[in-house]
Amino acid sequence: MESYIPISKLNDFIFCPMSLYFHSFYENYDQKLYHEKSQVEGKIKHENIEEGRYSTAKRFIQALPIYSQKYNLMGKIDIYDKEEKFLIERKNKVKKIYDGYRFQLWAQMFCLEEMGLEIKKLFIHSLSDNKRYEIEKPTGQNEFWLAQNIEKMKNFDLLNFNRDANLNKCARCIYRELCNQ
């Protein structure tokens, strides 16, 4: 039996497979040892969702566990608005919409649809400045792109990983001091 891939790991993998490795390695340690200020702030802000304190309105489903048999994914959504049929992923501060954000939201959408819920619109919500960005629903090509990256995650070989360094990404990586790439 194959285990499910956590949706939250898609963003890490798209950023850099090595960051996924380091993230997995450090999961059992106190996050204060390796999280930067922005990550600590984001985690604190996200607690409202995890504890169901975003809203008491019945229209909002918060922190719902989800899964997809088709893609072998599992995770939790932040917010699903049952009336509007909107799926909302909250981030601490959004400066740019990265592919990893899209993949995470698309994966959540596929899980919810597989579970029988309709999704009309997708949003990334930036908590720091209270801005909301609509994300396009995936086309056939985007769904293929997501599936391709899920396969890459499943087949990732740490020992044979060799990439061209993206200095901008590396400079923003919390594991930059540990990585020899």
Image: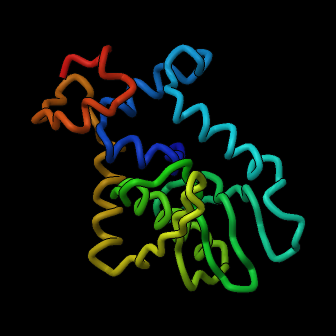
What residue is shown at x 19% (from left), y 30% (from top)? 161
| Residue 147, percent from left and from top | 34, 62
Check the image and name the residue furthest to the left.
164
Tell me the quarter of the image containing the C terminus. top left
Q: Is residue 101 above or below residue 171?
A: below
Q: Is residue 113 above or below residue 39?
A: below
| Residue 138, percent from left and from top | 39, 76
Render colour scheme: rainbow
Q: Where on the picture, by quarter, is residue 116?
A: bottom right
Work out whether residue 130 or residue 177 is closer to the camera in this orientation and state it.
Answer: 130
What is the total number of numbered labels drawn onto the structure image?
Answer: 0
Q: Is residue 118 above or below residue 90?
A: below
Work out whether residue 75 or residue 125 is closer to the camera in this orientation and state it.
Answer: 125
Q: Is residue 131 visible?
A: yes
Work out whether residue 54 or residue 146 is closer to the camera in this orientation and state it.
Answer: 54
What residue is shown at x 30% (from left), y 30% (from top)? 18
| Residue 45, percent from left and from top | 68, 44
| Residue 153, percent from left and from top | 34, 44
What residue is shown at x 32% (from left), y 33% (from top)? 172
Answer with left or right where residue 153 lies relative to residue 157.
right
Q: Is residue 1 visible?
A: no
Work out whether residue 162 or residue 165 is closer to the camera in this orientation and state it.
Answer: 165
What residue is shown at x 27% (from left), y 19% (from top)? 179
